[in-house]
Image (tube, coloured by chain):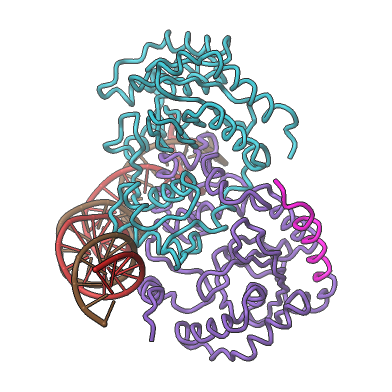
Chain colours: A purple, B cyan, C red, D brown
Amino acid sequence: MPTRRTKISADSQITEATSYGPPAAGSVKSAGRVLRILEFFDEIQRDARVAEVAERLAFPQSSTSILLNCLVELGYMDYLPESRSFLPSPRVTLLGTWLDKGPVRNGSLIRMLEELSHKTGDTVIIAARNGIFAQYIHVLQARSAMRFHVPPGSRRLVVWSATGFSLLTACNDREIRGLCTRTNAEAALGIPRIDTNQVVENVGRTRRDGYFFSAGLVTPGAGSIAIPLPEGIDGWNRALAVAVSGPLQDMTRRRAEIVALLNDVVQRYLRPAPSA
Amino acid sequence: MPTRRTKISADSQITEATSYGPPAAGSVKSAGRVLRILEFFDEIQRDARVAEVAERLAFPQSSTSILLNCLVELGYMDYLPESRSFLPSPRVTLLGTWLDKGPVRNGSLIRMLEELSHKTGDTVIIAARNGIFAQYIHVLQARSAMRFHVPPGSRRLVVWSATGFSLLTACNDREIRGLCTRTNAEAALGIPRIDTNQVVENVGRTRRDGYFFSAGLVTPGAGSIAIPLPEGIDGWNRALAVAVSGPLQDMTRRRAEIVALLNDVVQRYLRPAPSA
DNA sequence: TATTTAATATCATATATATGATTAAATGGA
DNA sequence: TCCATTTAATCATATATATGATATTAAATA
């Protein structure tokens, strides 16, 4: 039996957030908060005051105040005295720009998401694999009235979610089965046991169809249509998947339309020239 | 006597790092560390192990280990088991991308810096104003043997540095004088008193010449040539300045050449079409 | 201007984090 | 395989942070 280093760290880091679903707790509180604050601004795309940040992220007002002022001090936030509001500084924009010379950095991935969001009105998600999870690394919230709010950073089991199946299309069956075993071992806390054969089958279907339709697979009442992005899309060969998510009824009805749209935008934004 | 809110928070946040120069302490330790880690990867542009990060950033190894694993947990870092190394995830790339539809986001600012770095071999800096400081929000380290290492986040007095004078070209004399007063009040801890008239004169010269040459103004033995960037370059009207920095002798000798190069790259990368 | 309301900073302290020392694991030779 | 070496995780605890309550400030209104 090979000892797995990974297992150790996973155990120690995942405390009460051991289960899947909602965001990861993350052991260092303010570390996570800083990033959630930056993502919050990413979501609202305007300046915001202490009270608003505190409320939306459910941080205590006093802590939020201290943290925001600390970020100003460090040069990652600007303070706008006239409105007593905060806004990420250009220093943030530069973080991570080097990572990707391709679609992420040049903005075509973002533009693609914006078109998807605009044309569907639904929640649009990019997911990447993180351990046994598919983690939502970027979320454009739905603009429709009836909507599920999906916080960025949310996780779903990679072996049991629409985005997960899409991510797994890049893996062979042996790897997939290994992940199922690992998932059943690590995440087996009240979660129904994952059926390995069914996972392999679902991934296979995703490969054949080019997408996966989830009808309330994780969230009852929610439907998701996910497709894998072309490999190498992010510069270092890490699989990514995009999903459109909304009320199940809605997704079911518009399934064909959304699948067509997804294929279309991927084709237009990500295929043509992978040059800068 | 008007009460200034800003003053209060400045006092409480700036502890022992009250003086200018080296990086700001920032009150929330791990908040700052997270961002310094991301910037570190920005600097080395490859994966790195715990030990290396710990050493280069002078964090304790144990703290570094915990923090990196926490970032993996949160989905901001990828762990590469085969090399036991870490690398920022695509989630980081998306932070702050919305902020700027212009040169920062589309990469032309970055490409401009890269060309500057390549052609001069010297340290290349972008600075933005942060309170009474010009803060280095992005730094490409020199590739020459004899070099000063300039950590990103470093600060200089905006009223007494090459980048500062460049940033102040966007301000009128009244604002500049106000900043001098404020600087003398807030930062007067062993720093020679700033001569307001001389500051106004230096900014004026920067306006006329289009650049400012600093001969060891802050760091003895170091020379800097700074120029203001066109306004609105970052999408929300925040002044930015670019500087090339190196050994004073070197800078003095190549002054004309570097000034010409700076003007040239700004012209080529940032003037043409401010469209996406 | 005085008063009310809303928003944010500050304070003391309970609590979570950061750290040096240690243990455990992985790697590379003999 | 075993040992030496390198690297990273873990532990207990000193220390720094997070927080509810409160004071302060600014804005809105009379």
Instruction: Name the residue: 59% across, 58% down.
Output: A236
Instruction: Name the residue: 48% across, 23% down.
Output: B163
Q: Where are the magenta residues, as a range?
A: A258-276
Residue A126 locus on image (x, y percent): 64, 64
- The foreground one among A243 and B112 is B112
Instruction: Name the residue: 59% across, 37% down.
Output: B110
Image quadrant in which the N terminus of chain A is located: bottom left
- On the rendered structure, is A37 left or right of B264? left
> Could one spot residue B128 in this view of the protein?
no
Q: Is residue A111 above or below residue B205?
A: below
Instruction: Name the residue: 63% across, 57% down.
Output: A234
Residue A156 locus on image (x, y percent): 57, 75
Q: In this view, does B178 lie above or below B53?
A: above
- On the rendered structure, is C4 left or right of D21? right
Q: Is residue A135 above or below residue A101?
A: below
Residue B81 locus on image (x, y percent): 44, 68
